[in-house]
């Protein structure tokens, strides 16, 4: 959990919120209600109620509105679930969690803090749709594989990685698609061969060596949009065509141009270490200060 001016996420905890209107990202685990979705991140404030949070999850995951849903809080792996009242505020409850839980680091003693989406039966009982403990075990394993880069992030319904593929092309559909992807922590989106990046103002675990290997020698569009894909295409085009390549990075001040440049250099350096060319690493790294000066 983190406060944000534009973005926040539970993966990074910078400091305790100071303002009532600060926004947070709350991860809600739908379980068997949405097959293929590990968690659904939604934006919320301290005053956002459980009923409002559930409504956002229903809209994001396109769940059956004829059913009744409740939000449950768990504090122990496979342990007791505390059903939140519609007027309860999930963010306020999250602020009582240990810091390691907010940062999604391993907890000792079987502790496991999270919110679960549950279906409520007509008689008031909770429908779990199978073994709760088994589902938690499978979900935890999949979540860790996603964060380690061994599995891709789940694709949401109606989500388009390339804006050119939108069935209806207008300003609203463009912004809605970008907003939907951003809320899933997908900050990269293609427009043909152009890559749009939205600054998350936090570090995302999508720049480790596994991602370098994943995007090696792939054409644009084969995998989820990523700045590594752009760097990889430019690098291999340089080798194959034996001609200089140019990547243009533009944006407003604070949009993340410098960080994007660093990620590009990181990927190009990793590729050069494979033996395709000698001396490329030092040349690329030496370009960093020049690029910094050109931005100012």
Image (tube, rainbow, N blue to C red):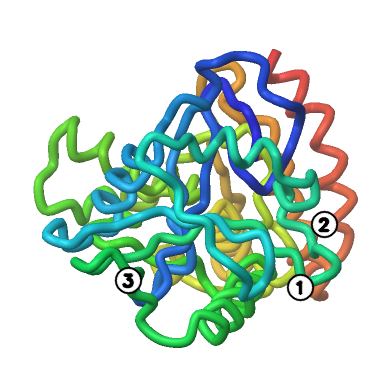
Give left or right: position of 63 versus 190.
left
Residue 163 seen from this side: yes
Check disc 1 and report the residue beneath it. Answer: 276
Asked if labels 1 and 2 touch by Cβ distance under 8 angstroms, the answer is yes
Of marks 1 and 3, the one in the foreground:
3
Check disc 2 and report the residue beneath it. Answer: 280
Residue that appears at 66% across and 57% down: 113
Residue 267 seen from this side: no
Quarter of the image for residue 118 reads: bottom left
Q: Position of residue 275 (x, y in %)?
A: 82, 75
Check disc 3 and report the residue beneath it. Answer: 33
Asked if labels 3 and 1 touch by Cβ distance under 8 angstroms, the answer is no
Asked if labels 3 and 2 touch by Cβ distance under 8 angstroms, the answer is no
Q: Earlier in the sequence, mark 1 or mark 3?
A: 3
Could you tell me which quadrant the N terminus lies in?
top right
- Disc 1, SS: helix
């Amino acid at each position: 959990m983190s406060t944000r001016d534009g973005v926040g996420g539970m993966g990074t905890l910078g400091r305790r919120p100071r303002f009532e209107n600060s926004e947070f990202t709350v991860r809600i685990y739908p379980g068997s209600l949405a097959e293929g979705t590990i968690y659904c991140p939604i934006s919320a404030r301290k005053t956002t109620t459980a009923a409002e949070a559930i409504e956002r999850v229903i809209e994001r995951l396109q769940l059956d509105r004829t059913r009744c849903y409740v939000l449950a809080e768990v504090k122990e792996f496979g342990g007791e679930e505390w059903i939140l009242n519609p007027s309860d505020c999930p963010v306020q409850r999250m602020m009582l969690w240990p810091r390691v839980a907010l940062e999604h680091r391993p907890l000792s003693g079987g502790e496991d803090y999270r919110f679960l989406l549950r279906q409520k039966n007509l008689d008031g009982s909770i429908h779990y749709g199978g073994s709760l403990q088994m589902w938690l075990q499978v979900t935890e394993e999949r979540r860790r594989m996603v964060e380690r880069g061994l599995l891709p992030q789940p694709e949401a319904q109606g989500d388009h990685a390339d804006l050119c593929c939108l069935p209806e092309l207008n300003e609203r559909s463009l912004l809605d698609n970008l907003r939907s992807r951003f809320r899933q922590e997908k900050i990269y989106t293609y427009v043909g061969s152009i890559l749009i990046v939205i600054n998350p103002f936090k570090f995302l675990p999508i720049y480790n060596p596994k991602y370098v290997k994943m995007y090696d020698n792939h054409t644009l569009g084969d995998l989820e949009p990523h700045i590594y894909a752009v760097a990889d295409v430019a690098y291999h085009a340089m080798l194959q065509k034996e001609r200089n390549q140019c990547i243009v990075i533009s944006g407003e001040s604070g949009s993340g141009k410098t960080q994007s440049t660093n990620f590009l250099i990181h990927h190009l350096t990793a590729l050069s270490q494979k033996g395709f060319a000698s001396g490329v690493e030092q040349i690329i790294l030496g370009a960093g200060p020049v690029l910094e000066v050109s931005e100012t």
